[in-house]
Amino acid sequence: MRGLVLLVTLACVARAQHQALIDYLERRLLAIEDRISLWQEQTTRYASDLRELKQQMVSQLENLDKEKETLRMNLDGVGTRVDRVERELDYLETQNGAQPCVDVDDKLIEQQVTQVKEKQRTKYLKLSDCSDMISTIKAMKILKRVGGQKGMWTKDTSRVSGKVYIFNGTDEDTFNEFASVQDFTRSPGMSLSTNVKLPSAWRGMGHVVFNSHVYYVNQAEDITVVKYDTRNNSVTDSAVFPAQDHVPVYGLNPETVMDLAVDEEGLWVIYATRQNERYISLAKLDGSSVDIEQMWDTNCPRENAEAAFVICGTLYVVYNTKQPGRSRVQCVFDVNGMVTNEEAPLVYFPKRYGSHSSLKYNPKEKLLYAWDDGYQILYKLVMKKKLEI
Ligand SMILES: *[C@@H]1O[C@H](CO)[C@@H](O)[C@H](O)[C@H]1NC(C)=O
Ligand SMILES: *[C@@H]1O[C@H](CO)[C@@H](O)[C@H](O)[C@H]1NC(C)=O
């Protein structure tokens, strides 16, 4: 009997324990289910938040697109207006502004020093058979931006040397020499160049490099052209420019007291004096002695001139405005009298709102080396025969 009671008691205890286990498990399952449903709820909320965000982004992007389109249309409108203003300005300038070429007052000519008159009277004897003149500017290539706002760059115009020369600034006593155009373009800054120190300072942007010689303009008491041999770094010659009372030759680049140029005929100097101060004068230089061979007064005004160059004995003066606009050749002077200003085409530089601090012609390549706000630019010229006009 005692044994039976014990058995029953044991069985009851076992059942109770079993029940407790089941209860415990059920509670755990419920808790887990609760948590799962909480997660599900959160996930749905996140998903709907994301959807909302995406919709907002899409509509904002659409708005941005619309704004971009309006902006582009506005810009187009501004561009057209700038073009129109520019055309109107050009028209006004040709109508009344500084008439680029007018007859020089007889009195002014009479005031010229006799030496100049004598050098003008003789007929110019051409050294080459070249008779090209500019037809248009075909292409423009921006090679680099090295150096300051104003400066001058050029290649040696002789047959053998392909060296490139940089005169950075307006008043220094050093220049940079690169072995080739390739070296110049791949050089970080001036690092592939040789910095050469000259025995005296140079002034303005009027220098040229011709047959391995740098001809630079020095202004102390007088204006001197110094001829410097780049092969052995020594001054070969120097000459005080004889014309008196100099004034800076270009209205828009007053740092250039006097400008040198090289063409098929050799070395030229473009200058201005107080005696004829509204106009630009031209002289032919002897390349070896730097002496003046002949002089001319041109009808090209200094006002609004930014640079000039000589091709086959014809001077081309480039004009711009104080607010940099489009540069154009608006006055020519031919020492052989074959090209008159009326017949010469009005040559515009490619559309770029800039100003040139120097323009150097290379007769071998028919290229202009230009410096515009620190950019080194090449212009490719298309020529035609002078007689064909
Ligand atoms: C070029 O000249 C300008 C001043 O005209 C100067 O600020 C600049 O440092 C120079 N650059 C180099 C590379 O010599
Ligand atoms: C430099 O070279 C030129 C030409 O070769 C020569 O006439 C001149 O005397 C040389 N100058 C010096 C200082 O050696």
Image: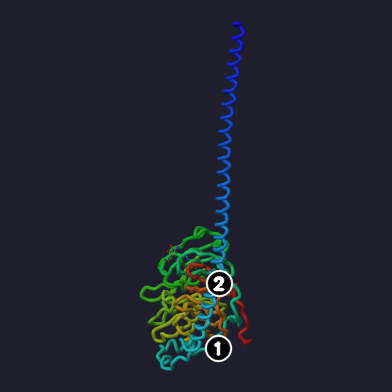
SS of the residue under disc 1: loop
Q: Quadrant of residue 244?
A: bottom left
Given residues 17 and 252, the one toward you in this image is 17
Q: Residue at x 58, y 42 (%)?
A: 40
Q: Residue furthest front?
A: 1
Residue 340: give its label: 1
Please provide percent x and percent y for residue 343: 57, 88
Q: Amino acid at mark 1?
A: Thr
Tell me if I can see residue 232 in this picture: no
Nearest to N terminus: mark 2 or mark 1: 2
SS of the residue under disc 2: helix
Given residues 136 and 70, the one toward you in this image is 70
Q: Quadrant of residue 311?
A: bottom right
- Is 215 above or below relative to 185? below
- Local crowd at mark 2 within 10 Å, few (<14), some, or many (≥20)? few
2 vs 1, front mark: 2
- Local crowd at mark 1 within 10 Å, few (<14), some, or many (≥20)? some
Tell me if I can see residue 217 in this picture: yes
Q: Residue at x 46, y 84 (%)?
A: 301
Quadrant of the image containing the N terminus = top right
- Is 301 above or below relative to 55? below
Q: Quadrant of residue 55?
A: bottom right
- Is 306 above or below relative to 42? below
Query: What whole-number distance in Å separates the C-alpha atoms at marks 2 and 1?
Result: 44 Å
Q: Amino acid at mark 2?
A: Met
Please provide percent x and percent y for residue 66: 56, 66
What count of labels does the image hold? 2
Please provide percent x and percent y for residue 335: 53, 85
Given residues 118 and 102, the one toward you in this image is 102
Residue corresponding to mark 2: 73
Quadrant of the image containing the C terminus = bottom right
